[in-house]
Image: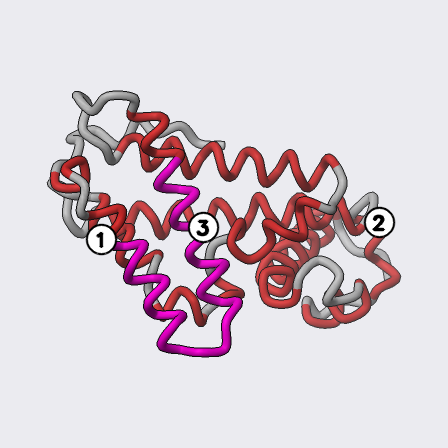
Amino acid sequence: MRVSRAQAEANRERVIDVASRLFRRHGFDGIGLKDLMEAAGLTQGGFYKQFASKEDLAANACARGYAAVRERWREFAARDPERPLVPLVRAYLSPEHRDEQAEGCVMAALGPDAARAGPAVRASMEEGVVAYVDFLEACLPDDLDDRRRRAMAIASTMIGAMVLSRSVNDPVLSKEILDASIRDILDRPAAATGRENRGSTSEH
C-alpha cells in the first residue's frame, strides 16, 4: 500500500525520535536496524526509502537528541535567572540524569561511539557540543575573563563526569564523581552570578 508524502515524513520523524533514545541507551552498534524500525512500529524494508544509511539516521538522531537536551537546559537555567549555572549544573550532574541515559546528554551517552563513527555523525556531534558551550557561555557573567574558555572547561567537566559516573559499579564512587564535579564548577566565583540575556544563545 502506497503511503502519502505526509505519512512518509511522519514515519521518518518517528524513526528519528525512537533512534535518538535507543542509540543513547544501547550505542550506535548496540541495536540493529530491524529492532529500531520495529520500535518505531515500522518494517525494516522501508528504512532505505527514508535514510541513506544507518550513519545518516545516527546523525539525525544525534541532532534530535541535542535539540531536546537544549530545551531541558533552558528549563533548568530558568529556575534561577540570577544564577542560571547553579540549577543547570546540579540537574546535569545528578543521579537522575546518570540513570536516565536514553533521555539524557547525547555526548555523554554517545561521545565514545562518535569518535569511531563517520564524518556525518561527528559533524552532528560537533554542532551539539558548540551549542552546549554557547549556552554555558551565556550563563556566565559578562565581565568574566575568557568566558569562552571557561564555558568549554565547564562543558568538558560536566560531560566527562557523567561518563565516568556511569562507568563504575560502586554507587558511592559514582555519586562522589558527580558531587566533586559540582563543587569544582560551582565553588568558583563565576557561578554566583548570571547574565540577564540568555535568549541570544545561538541554535545549531
Residue 129 lies, in percent from the top left, at 49, 38
Disc with the residue nearer the chain's start (1 vs 2):
2
Q: Is residue 60 above or below residue 21?
A: above
Identify the residue at horizontal 67%, vertical 44% (top origin). Answer: 115
Task: Tell me, yes or no, whether the highlighted magenta stretch contains residue 180.
Answer: yes
The local secondary structure at tag 2 comes to helix
Identify the residue under disc 1: 87
Residue 19 lies, in percent from the top left, at 65, 59
Q: Nearer the viewer, residue 155 or 127?
A: 155
The residue stretch that appears in magenta: 153-182
Disc 2 to disc 3, C-alpha distance: 35 Å
Task: Tell me, yes or no, whether the highlighted magenta stretch contains residue 7.
Answer: no
Disc 1 to disc 3, C-alpha distance: 16 Å
Disc 1 to disc 2, C-alpha distance: 43 Å
Residue 197 lies, in percent from the top left, at 21, 29
How many neighbours does mark 1 have within 10 angstroms: few (below 14), some (14-19), or many (20 or more)?
some
Question: Which of the 4 image quadrants contains residue 172?
Answer: bottom left
Tell me the number on the disc at residue 159: 3
Identify the residue under disc 2: 49
